[in-house]
């Protein structure tokens, strides 16, 4: 092709133009610190959006997950169940807390944690005398896990439930926002997420007192005293007031960004999803999912080439960036020794799964270009 084509990337920041004002305010008022009016306003905007009392703005989603586990009382030697098919940041904080992760596979119908397998795992672990303290469940690519049966099983076995909603801000499960269903909910504002602060995270909890406790722990757990006094182990996990200014500007367009991601998925479902050998990620009827990334599987025998060859062709011939679905944790060298229930579903999705360009800034023409490129690669 002779014309110069813009490269289509997987998921990039999409600014509203309103971020700079808040960042400038931080500079003008000299609130270049962790804490300040932008942090307060960003937290308030998130709390309103989620319909909760308290949200703590933190330095990353990973930090929020770590604090959730600390607040859940997870400590050395404890067992924590966790989604096997996810990004590594879902699992690492379990190790930070000194606890032992036990992986649970996804189910085919949702690509998310399999509630039946979770129940089996808990029964089997009980047989070995192991009583896990918590579950960390990810909402994969902005599609909610089936929370009702998951919460029921966890209640029965006395597990604290941490929702890793890093990919799911804006998704709902039976009308309720992802991240507000369990005991703790975690969000991320990394550069590739539905909204970004360039880097950051947030924590909410069923008990608002625990969110206030999270703010205390996130600022080195300093006791109220005129001098520096510390009775418990704290962290430096607070979000800066500069960064929170970006978050304020992003919150003003969150609803639009969510709609754009959903529209991407709808477009791909009507185009790419109709190609032989392609199946879109399920969009289970129990929720209004975000579809942070639009994903599909490629059956090589029907499609004509396999996922990896397709990725290479999209990249080299069409200047389109795609990614494989997350590699399951039980296949990672880091977690090779972890106990895992199931694993075949995640392996299949890793083998055939493809994440399509999904930025909220993609135009209709961009989406059509991706769809046409996918069709061309079939021949
Ligand atoms: C992005 C992400 C995280 C981590 O968030 P950070 O803000 O980058 O630390 C955690 N879990 C999942 C599933 C994610 O996609």
Image (tube, rainbow, N blue to C red):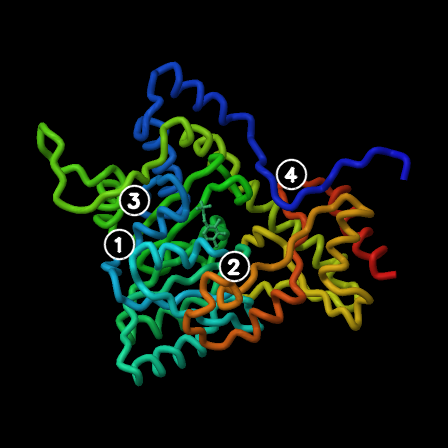
Taking the view exactly as shown, the residue that stands out farthest to the right is 2
Q: Is residue 286 visible?
A: no
Q: Is mark 2 within 8 Å of ligand 1?
A: yes
Between discs 4 and 3, the one toward the N terminus: 3
Q: Nearer the viewer, mark 1 or mark 4?
A: 1
Q: Quadrant of residue 17?
A: top right
Q: Nearer the viewer, mark 2 or mark 1?
A: 1
Along the viewing direction, whichever of 80 and 19 lies nearer the viewer: 80
Between discs 1 and 4, the one toward the N terminus: 1
Label 2 secondary element: helix
Q: Which residue is mark 2?
A: 140
Mark 2–mark 1 distance (CA, rounded to whole Å): 23 Å
Q: Is there CB contact under 8 Å for labels 3 and 1?
A: no
Q: Which residue is mark 4?
A: 361
Return the mark for residue 70.
Answer: 1
Q: Is there CB contact under 8 Å for labels 2 and 3?
A: no
Mark 3 nearby-residue class (10 Å; few <14, some 14–19, many ≥20): many
Along the viewing direction, whichever of 225 and 369 lies nearer the viewer: 225
Return the mark for residue 54.
Answer: 3
12 lies above or below 177: above
Mark 4–mark 2 distance (CA, rounded to whole Å): 21 Å
Q: Quadrant of residue 117?
A: bottom left
Mark 2–mark 3 distance (CA, rounded to whole Å): 24 Å
């Amino acid at each position: 092709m002779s014309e110069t084509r813009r490269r289509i990337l997987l998921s990039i920041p999409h600014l509203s133009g309103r971020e700079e004002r808040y960042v400038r305010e931080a500079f003008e008022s000299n609130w270049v610190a962790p804490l300040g009016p932008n942090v307060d306003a960003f937290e308030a905007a998130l709390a309103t959006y989620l319909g909760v009392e308290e949200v703590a703005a933190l330095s990353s989603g990973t930090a929020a997950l770590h604090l959730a586990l600390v607040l859940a009382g997870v400590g050395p030697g404890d067992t924590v169940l966790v989604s096997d098919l996810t990004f590594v940041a879902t699992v690492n904080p379990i190790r930070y807390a000194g606890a032992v992760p036990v992986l649970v596979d996804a189910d085919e119908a949702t690509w998310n944690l399999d509630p039946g397998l979770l129940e089996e795992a808990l029964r089997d672990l009980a047989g070995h005398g192991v009583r896990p303290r918590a579950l960390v469940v990810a909402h994969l690519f902005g599609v909610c896990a089936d929370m009702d049966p998951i919460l029921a099983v966890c209640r029965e076995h006395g597990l604290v439930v941490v929702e890793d909603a890093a990919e799911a801000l804006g998704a709902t499960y039976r009308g309720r926002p992802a991240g507000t269903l369990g005991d703790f909910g975690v969000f991320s504002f990394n550069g590739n997420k539905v909204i970004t602060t360039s880097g950051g995270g947030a924590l909410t909890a069923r008990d608002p007192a625990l969110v206030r406790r999270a703010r205390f722990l996130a600022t080195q757990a300093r006791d109220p005293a005129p001098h520096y006094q510390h009775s418990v182990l704290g962290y430096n996990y607070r979000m800066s007031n500069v960064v929170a200014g970006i978050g304020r500007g992003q919150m003003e367009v969150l609803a639009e960004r969510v709609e754009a991601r959903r529209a991407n998925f709808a477009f791909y479902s009507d185009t790419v999803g109709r190609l032989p050998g392609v199946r879109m990620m399920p969009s289970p009827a129990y929720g209004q999912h975000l579809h942070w990334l639009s994903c599909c599987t490629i059956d090589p025998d029907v499609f004509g080439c396999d996922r990896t060859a397709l990725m290479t062709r999209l990249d080299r011939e069409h200047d389109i960036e795609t990614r494989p679905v997350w590699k399951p944790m039980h296949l990672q060298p880091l977690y090779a020794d972890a106990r895992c229930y199931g694993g075949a579903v995640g392996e299949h999705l890793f083998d055939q799964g493809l994440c399509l360009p999904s930025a909220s800034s993609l135009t209709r023409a961009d989406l059509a270009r991706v769809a046409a490129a996918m069709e061309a690669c079939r021949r």
